[in-house]
Amino acid sequence: QACLYVVATPIGNLEDLSPRARQVLEAVDLILAEDTRHSQRLLQHFGIRTACKSLHEHNEQQQVPGLIDRLKGGQTLALISDAGTPLISDPGYRLVKAAREADVRVTPIPGASALIAALSVSGLPSDRFFFEGFLPARASARQERLKVLADFPHTLIFYESSHRIQASLADMASSLGAERRAVVARELTKTFEQIQDGSLADLCLWLEADTDHQRGEFVVMVAGHEPGEQAAGEAEARRVLGLCLQQLP
Ligand code: SAM
């Protein structure tokens, strides 16, 4: 029966592929992968020989009509991305939307997603949170976006790459407050997994302290704004200023 399966794949440790995900990837007519070469490593590891076609940001729009025709013709397709859950900062939205509009069955095969894995070990409030994904690459746009998020009362979750982790954390410290609590989850499920917490200022120093800390993939989580935080910050600034003034001749 026609179906589009949206299949989560591991975010590092290949053993996190669920048995059901494996069965589905073996059984479907075609796997749609963000990068077929990248996904071959996973598929070969499990001896899965299903045909693969690429579906990425740049060809998704153009591929959708043909894929919907296949589904309408009764085929089964599985959508995967390079890592984690498709559509979460990854391609697939247009295909899923079109499949639903065409009344095709769309079903999830759940599994890893870096944001949920990171939040689950962060120790930050997890009852409500806001997933921002990637901040803009340009510094001015990034700072603008952080200003919008500064007063948000719930835990903020960001994705970041090794290229921009230092610049992003520095901008978070200046826009959200250097004293704000935060957690950096790096290389989750991989050999060099690290989960580091502290104030945003502490985390900037931690990154600087060792270039190894700047490698790999990151989820950054920042505590939500607490009412009174600014007042407390200002009181602390007045206290420090008072101490400095006392030292003046
Ligand atoms: N769809 C994926 C998911 O469900 O998590 C996210 C894809 S997004 C293109 C890639 C980003 O996810 C990375 O830049 C990083 O921020 C985060 N990420 C993926 N794997 C990770 C890991 N093992 N540890 C930490 N962050 C990871």
Image (cartoon, rainbow, N blue to C red):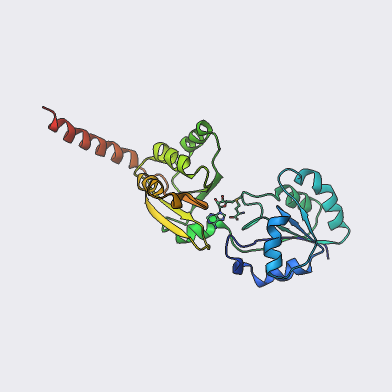
Quarter holding residue 32? bottom right
**Nearer the observer, 182 or 223:** 182
Residue that extends furthest to the top in the rendered view of this protein: 249
Q: How many marks?
A: 0
Q: Position of residue 8 (x, y in %)?
A: 65, 61
Answer yes or no: is residue 88 visible. yes
Residue under the point 48% across and 38% down: 146
- What residue is shown at x 89% (from left), y 58% (from top)? 73
Residue at 62 percent across and 57 percent down: it is 83
Where residue 125 sits in the image (x, y, percent)?
Answer: 43, 55
Image location (x, y in percent) of residue 37: 71, 56
In this rendering, position of residue 193 left or right of residue 231: right
Quadrant assignment, res 61 = top right
| Quadrant occupied by the N terminus | bottom right
Residue at the right extreme? 73
Between 30 and 108, the residue placed more toward the observer is 30
**Whether residue 108 is visible:** no
Q: Is residue 217 left or right of residue 97?
A: left
Residue that sits furthest to the left in the current view: 249
Q: Residue at x 29, y 41 (%)?
A: 232
Q: Position of residue 131 (x, y in %)?
A: 54, 49
> Quadrant of the image for the C terminus?
top left
